[in-house]
Amino acid sequence: MRVVVPFAARRPKTRLSDALSADERAAFARAMLADVLAAVAAAGREPEVLATAPLGVEWPVTVDERPLTAAVNRVLAGEADDASEDEADDASEVGVGDEAVAVVMADLPLATPAALSRLFDADGGVVLVPGRGGGTNALVARHPEFRVDYHGASYRDHRAAARRAGVEPAAVDSYRLSTDVDERGDLVEVLLHADGRARDWLVDAGFELSVTEGRVGVERR
Amino acid sequence: MRVVVPFAARRPKTRLSDALSADERAAFARAMLADVLAAVAAAGREPEVLATAPLGVEWPVTVDERPLTAAVNRVLAGEADDASEDEADDASEVGVGDEAVAVVMADLPLATPAALSRLFDADGGVVLVPGRGGGTNALVARHPEFRVDYHGASYRDHRAAARRAGVEPAAVDSYRLSTDVDERGDLVEVLLHADGRARDWLVDAGFELSVTEGRVGVERR
C-alpha cells in the first residue's frame, strides 16, 4: 500500500491567520506534517509526500504544482510521479490498479499509529475518514476507478464516487483522524490530545488552554 | 453495567438559539435523546435517563434537579435514585462500588451501537470519550472513587481525577461519540452522518447542506 500525504507547501493554513503569522503558519504546518509522517512510519508504512513545491523531509517527495484533487487523482491513476511519457507507460502497468493507495492529509496532528492502522487495515474497496464539516481527512482506495474531488462536501461526494465505481464505501470512526486543524478553535484539540511536534510548536509559541465561563479556547502568552 | 443518559429537560441547547427557536430546540434535543437511547438499547444495554424534570420516554427516568456534575456524582456514589434515607442505605450496598456505570451525553445523534459497544467493552477502570473543545461526551467508570466535574476542560480534569483514584485513564477514539451537537455548525455533522430522529427532525424543519465557496454549512428553506 502506498501512503501519500499531500502538502500545500506555499501559503498553508490561511484560515489560521487570526492566530498565526504567515511564517508561523508555515512552520506549524511543517510540524503537523512531521507528526503525520512519523505516525505513518510508526504504523509500519513508508509515507510519500505529495507537495506543491520542493521541501526537505526524510521521506520521498513528489512535486506536483496542480491543485490537490488533480494531484491526488494522478496518483490514483497510477501515473509515474516524475516520469517521462515512456516511463509513465511503464509505470502505469504497475500503477494503482494493482496496489492500494492511502491518502492522509497533512493537518492531522492527533493521528496515532493505532488510529492509522485502523484505516490501513480496514476492509473495503474504498475506505473513508470524514473530517469535521464534510471533508475527507483520509482514505484508502483499492478500486482502480475511484477518483477524488476535494472541493465542497467531499465526504458525501466520495461516497457517491465509490458507489459509481461499484463499491460500497466503508468508514473508519476515529476522532483523531477526523480532527483536521484549520482554525484557531482547532488548536484546543492539539493542546489537549496531541503529543508531537505540532503541540510542542504551539507550546513554544506561547499557546495554552484558557477556560472562560466554561468554554475552552486557547490564548497566547 | 448501568448506562445513564443525563438530559437537561428545561431550556436545552441554548447555543443553538441562532438556528432554532426555544420550542424547536426542545424538540430537537428530545429527538437527539431518542437517538442516543435507541443506540444504547441496540448495543444491548438498558438506558436510564437522568433528567432535570419529568419526561415521557420508554426507559426509566430519574429526576434530579441539581446541576449535571452533582446529579452524575450521585449516581457514581451508588446512591439510590429516588429512595428514602433507609432505602438509600440499602441501595448503597449494591451501588456503583459493585457495578460499572456508563454516562453517555444526550446530544450525540451520531452515536451508533457499534461505537457505543467500543466504549462499553473497552478495558479500564475509567474510560473516557472526549468531546470537541475539551469536554467529556461519554465515559465508563468502574472505580468506586472516580467522580466527575463537567465544568470547563472536563476531559483533562477527568484524566487527572482518574489518576488521583489510582487508575490510568483509557480513551475510545470515535468521531461519532466525540461529536456533540451544540452549535449551528454542528448541524452539518447531523445531516451528513446521522440517520435517526434528529436528522429527520432537521430535514423536516427545512435544513439542508449548503456549500459556499468550498465551505460546508447548513441553510434553512
Image (cartoon, coloured by chain):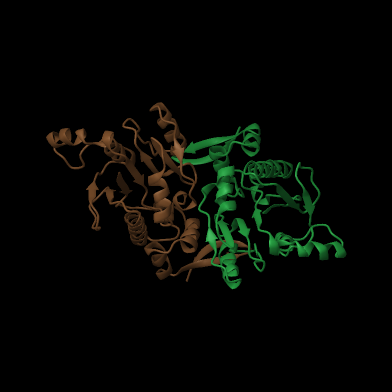
Chain colours: A brown, B green
Tell me residue A127's x, y (percent). Answer: 41, 39
In front of the other: B181 or A170: A170
**Residue depicted at 66% across the width and 69% down the height:** B145
To which quarter of the image does residue B147 belong? bottom right
Tell me residue B1's x, y (percent). Answer: 67, 54
Left or right for A208, reference B59: left
Q: Is residue A9 above or below residue A27?
A: above
To which quarter of the image does residue A129 belong? top left
Residue B112 makes an appearance in the image = no
The N terminus of chain A sits in image quarter: top left
**Residue depicted at 52% across the width and 36% down the height:** B210
In front of the other: A184 or A148: A148
Tell me residue B109's x, y (percent). Answer: 61, 43
Left or right for A40, reference B53: left
Left or right for A29, reference A130: left
Q: Is residue A135 above or below residue A17?
A: above
Residue A18 makes an appearance in the image = yes
Left or right for B74, reference A17: right
